[in-house]
Image (cartoon, rainbow, N blue to C red):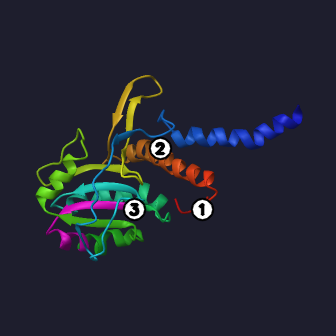
Amino acid sequence: MKKNIVLFVLFVLPIVAYLFFASGVNSFISLPTITKNVPEVNTWKTLDNKPVALTNKITILGFIGTDVMKHKGSFFNLYEIIYDKYKDFKDFQVVMVLPDGTQKQVEDLLKLDIKQLGTHKGWKFVFASPNDIVAFYDKLQLVGKLDTTLATPNVFIIDKKRNLRGRKGEDQKGTPEYKEGYNTIFVSELYNKMMDDMKIIIYEYRAALKKNHNATKEL
């Protein structure tokens, strides 16, 4: 009997604790899908002329608009709270969508600001015409809208199959809950909600890798 208790404490409790803390305040074991089949962005321009793809990547997707420096504080929040934690994972990336013509602003941001934080190798910036950006955003089927500069403070979690993930259903108190994006202006939202939801996404892929006997640091 004592042996069984010891085994339970050593092996079962850590798993239960991990699942509890991985889910945080989110009542979902698997993060619900908000929108399926998010379009690809691999035909859009980039700073280094290398295509950026969403497929087979866990992506944080954002829309910056025409005034890049206006969102500098949001960049720092996202970098320090989310990106810095997952930057070493090969299959993780942050993709920012901007109107064509803002390339110089992005270069200045990378040189003067983000560089001070450290590596930004996992940050990707893609550029398209305003019409293409609006059409792409509309296909995300979101409640929130872009502003007149084609920006939003929200960022979105896209899984490897190009599904937009979030919260949809009821929370632990039985209250209806819907969350399609995470406001980068508010540090508390990134810590308390986005971090919880990212843990669930990461756990999903780690579990899949272990099931296939390929558990490595690559998601």
Front residue of this view, candidates 134 and 196: 134
- For the record, the magenta segment spans 94-107
Determine whether, in the image, residue 99 is placed left or right of residue 26: left
Name the residue beneath numbered marker 3: 93
* Amino acid bearing label 3: Gln
Q: Quadrant of residue 142?
A: top left
Tag 1, which secondary structure? loop
Tell me, yes or no, whether the highlighted magenta stretch contains residue 54.
no
The residue drawn where x is 33% and y is 49% is 156
The residue drawn where x is 84% and y is 35% is 4
Name the residue beneath numbered marker 2: 196
Tag 2, which secondary structure? helix
Tag 3, which secondary structure? strand
Image location (x, y in percent) of residue 33: 38, 40
Q: Quadrant of residue 17?
A: top right
Name the residue beneath numbered marker 1: 216
**Along the polypeptide, which appears first: circle 1 or circle 3?**
3
For label 1, count other residues whose C-alpha is less than 10 Å away and answer few (under 14), some (14-19) or many (20+): few
Q: CA distance from mark 1 to mark 2?
A: 22 Å
User: Where is 96 relative to 208, above or below?
Assistant: below
Q: Which mark is residue 56?
A: none
